[in-house]
Image (tube, rainbow, N blue to C red):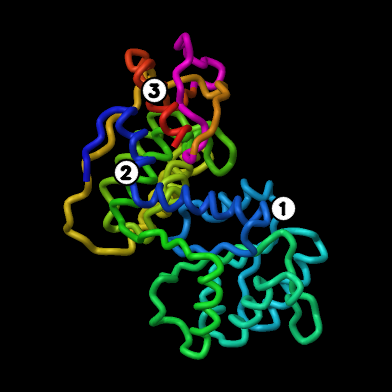
Amino acid sequence: MEHRTTMLEWLEVRKSNPIAEAMHMVEKLCQSVVLGQRSAAYFSGPPGIGKSYNISRVTKKRFLTCNPTNYLSLLKSIEQAQIEGKALFLDEADVIFRSERMANVLKTATGARDLRYWDGECVDVPGGIFVATNQDLLDRTWMERSAAGHCSALFSRASPINIPHDLLQLWEYSIALAQTGGLLRVDYCGMPINLDTVNRAFDWFTVNVYRLDTVSPRTLHQIASDMNQRRLGRMDTDLENFYLKNRLTRESDQTPPPTPFKITPSEARPASKRLPKTVFGPVPAPPATRKRNRKSDVYEIGVPASNVIEFMKRWEETMTD
């Protein structure tokens, strides 16, 4: 894996990282469902990488989340989505592909609009259906054999997107979101995260990448949030260490990737600066002046002033791709 040492190099992750490319396609597929070009979207991948976030952003938070456990709960969720006039997000929906009956219901609900009826009841969801699972949808061996025919019909209408489970790629994608997308702007309590805490979270996340229970942007954010809460005095050191230790569920002697370069105030911009968005969130274009935000004593990640022209060229390229 490439050793990235500048903010410009981390911006390139959008084009070279398989996780970033897959998540970009997830966003495009979700948009096609909202526009009515597809009746459903299917994607699989590890938890915490932003599947729900993409759906929330594309649907403007107008969606109903359901973790179907059986045939009746699936029908009830469809009915509730119809009543509320929202899209339906079936999360951790492995069970659907292990049940011939549930797969058949989903096939009916995403078929021709005038044929979306099950036992005389309409199962049409005007807002569209999003289906996510942690299992590989391109691998049919784990699916119920009796449901295989229905699954083939589902995926012929909308090809599933499989997000890789590669630990190093997930690590790189997570760090890139923090370096260039404002992932670590605030913690889970809405409190600003300072640069020292961001750098400390980078170090810990990187050193323990092969020992973590899950490697994802959500994991990195939770680590930085715990550290920030301890820094603010809202959490004592023992509790912080307890939370961090509980994330280490694997034994590994593999060499971790190189620690990301340290963010310094000269490479940061005030947190109040509003900028356009990319697949990673706000574009970290540098401001004209670099005054410290003394009120909050917080900087947001940006790029060195000496690289402004080159950065804006790269940014324009990413927006036109």
Quadrant for the C terminus, please.
top left
Query: In the rendered image, which residue does mark 1 sit on?
Result: 62
Label 3, label 1: how many angstroms apart (C-alpha)?
Answer: 35 Å
Where residue 199 sits, quadrant-wise, is top left
Q: Nearer the viewer, residue 170 or 110?
A: 110
Residue drawn where x is 34% and y is 27% of the image: 263
The kind of residue on which mark 1 rests is Arg
Task: Please give left or right for residue 149 compared with residue 310 in the image.
Answer: right
Task: Give the class, few, some or many, for how many residues have Cα within 10 Å of label 3's Cα (few <14, many ≥20).
Answer: few
Percent coordinates x, y for residue 19 in the rendering: 38, 51
Select label 2 or label 1 by which is in front. Answer: 2
N-terminal-most mark, 3 or 1: 1
Residue drawn where x is 79% and y is 66% of the image: 82
Q: Nearer the viewer, residue 89 or 186?
A: 89
Res. 93 visible in picture? yes
**Secondary element type, mark 3:** helix
Task: Give the class, few, some or many, for how many residues have Cα within 10 Å of label 2's Cα (few <14, many ≥20).
Answer: few
What segment is highlighted magenta in the picture? 279-297
Q: Nearer the viewer, residue 173 or 30?
A: 30
The kind of residue on which mark 3 rests is Lys
Label 2, label 1: how many angstroms apart (C-alpha)?
Answer: 32 Å
Label 2, label 3: how many angstroms apart (C-alpha)?
Answer: 17 Å
Res. 238 visible in picture? no
Query: In the rendered image, which residue does mark 3 sit on?
Result: 313
Percent coordinates x, y for residue 216 in the rendering: 41, 52
Q: Main secondary structure of the magenta part?
A: loop
**Secondary element type, mark 1:** loop
Q: Nearer the viewer, residue 110 or 93?
A: 110
Query: In the rendered image, which residue does mark 2 sit on?
Result: 16
**Residue 276: within the magenta?**
no
**Secondary element type, mark 2:** helix
N-terminal-most mark, 2 or 1: 2
